[in-house]
Image: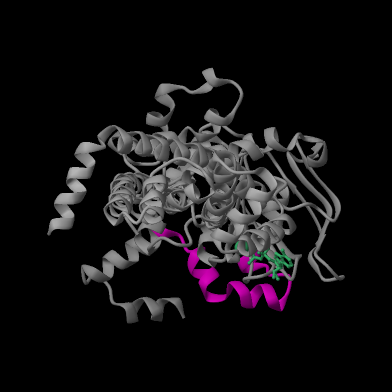
Amino acid sequence: MGFIEFNHVVKSYSGDVKVIDDITLSIERGEFVTIVGPSGCGKTTLLKMVNKLIPISQGNIYIDGKDVIDWETISLRRSIGYVIQHIGLLPHLNIEDNINYVPSISKRKSGIDKNRAKELIELVGLSDDYLSRYPRQLSGGQMQRIGVARALTADPEIILMDEPFGAVDEIARTQLQHEIKEIHKKLKKTILFVTHDIQEALKLGTKIVLLKNGKIEQIGTQEELVFKPKSEYVKAFFGLKGFQASLNENVMHNVYNRILLKQETLDGIYRKLE
Amino acid sequence: MKIITDILNLYKERFSFFLELLIQHMMLTLISVSIITVIGLSTGILMTRNEGFAKVVLMVTNFMYTIPSIALFGVLVIITGIGNKSAIIALVIYGLLPVIRNTYVGINEVDNQIIESAIGMGSTNIQLLLRVQLPLALPVIFAGFRTMVIMTIALCAIASFIGAGGLGVAIWRGITTNFPEMTLAGSLLVALLAIITDFILEIVEKHMKKRIWGSVK
Ligand SMILES: Nc1ncnc2c1ncn2[C@@H]1O[C@H](COP(=O)(O)OP(=O)(O)O)[C@@H](O)[C@H]1O
Ligand SMILES: [Mg+2]
């Protein structure tokens, strides 16, 4: 049994429209699973059922072998990191208190480790000068970093991220993607990461789940989804963008540099490829 | 400008009389304000937990507002008699609306995303209220509180018509004994008390907004 296990999970609101339609999915410890799909396909719903923000209609979700129904809700949530697009930093608390929010609401008051916030803010690439600032004094990208740091404070094994980098500019997003990947390598957390950005999903996920109308359309590695699409839908969804994301960045960099240095021309490269 | 010197002389001659009325006025206001704050805050908070309850409360408080104060005082005299008790009850009834409404609106207006992430991180209901909703709603709640305090100070002057103490006594006496300087002297003190209190509360409110929201919006 996987670390996180979805077993025939269904979610329907009023009526018989199934927003999540019989999803079965097994996630191993330490995996970085990206969940991608068009807007409204059920990505957020799927994620929120894990930390019980949305009740499950049918089926079960098991975490570490135990049904989420049987987990005490508050302690389950405290042991899962949660990052959303709009960050939800508390505007009336400074960055240090924001990072320490989970330990501060947990019963063990002694759980607030003075050095933890400093350690974490450095992990997400900011200096500890920021600890005494307020969220409004930070840029969108910086706030998002704090969001990530905050999700790590209580050292959770699982982190849920819902389009965490959706609202930041492209440069900051690329950096954040790079950093979350490094953090994953370093800390080996199990990450469920929702995005509608194809390249982001392919770049970050060790396993990628493509959702369509509440169903899993295909699940697999980057290569499987891009080069072995199971359906026309998958092929069309990833398309050229998916192909671009699976190109080796170092190789592409070399090619690019060679053209810059006039050692080669773009036309010449195209000719070789044909 | 004879009237001004007359009033000033009146303050000088009857200093202890006015001082006592002023203190009574402040005490009546203080008691009412405390009761209103406790009832208003808790009602407002309960309303955010139950929409049906919220609707009923808003209907009732809005209705109370349409009753002229004199009529309300009249009714209360019949029920609870003449004196401070009736006055305080009337002041409380009038003062509740701004506090209830602003507490309810202030909490409801806190950004949903902030609430969601606070819940997602494992806040209990009470932690959500005390650590997130109330602090963030505080500037709005305080604005309601400020309105209520000023209103209570003013309305308290009318309360003397049903035998309560306070500066209304001077106003009332001036009217009944055809002594306009007395009426004016009392009114002036009420106005002064209201203006100074409002000034102080405004500073507190601005400070609070800056502290919590980062701007005075
Ligand atoms: N409270 C709700 N009541 C009814 N339908 C809802 C509710 N929340 C979400 N939905 C519907 O569920 C579907 C999936 O939503 P969501 O999981 O947010 O999609 P995604 O995150 O993939 O964009 C959407 O069609 C949305 O309209
Ligand atoms: Mg979504």
Of residues B24 and A2, the one drawn nearer to the viewer in this rendering: B24
Q: Quadrant of ligand 1?
A: bottom right
Residue situated furthest front in the rendering = B177
Indicate the position of residue A70 as horizontal and vertical percent values: 82, 36
The image quarter containing residue B101 is bottom right
Q: Is residue A224 in sight in this rendering?
A: no
Indicate the position of residue A83 as horizontal and vertical percent values: 54, 48
Residue A245 lies in the magenta-colored region: yes
The answer to whether B212 is drawn above or below residue A230 in the figure is: above
- Per the picture, the main secondary structure of the magenta-coloured stretch is helix
Of residues A142 and A1, the one drawn nearer to the viewer in this rendering: A142
Tally the marks.
0
The residue positioned 33% from the left and 41% from the top of the image is A126
Q: If the image is split into quadrants, where does the N terminus of chain A sit?
A: top right
Of residues B117 and A237, the one drawn nearer to the viewer in this rendering: B117
The answer to whether B3 is drawn above or below residue B89 in the figure is: below
Color scheme of the displayed model: one colour
Which residues make up the magenta segment?
Answer: A223-249
The answer to whether B16 is drawn above or below residue B171 in the figure is: above
Residue B56 lies in the magenta-colored region: no
Indicate the position of residue A207 as horizontal and vertical percent values: 64, 53
Of residues B183 and A178, the one drawn nearer to the viewer in this rendering: B183
The answer to whether A213 is drawn above or below residue A253 in the figure is: below
Residue situated furthest left in the rendering = B1
The residue positioned 62% from the left and 43% from the top of the image is B42
- Taking the image as shown, residue B109 lies to the left or right of residue A16, namely left
Indicate the position of residue B38 as horizontal and vertical percent values: 57, 39
Q: Is residue A164 in sight in this rendering?
A: yes
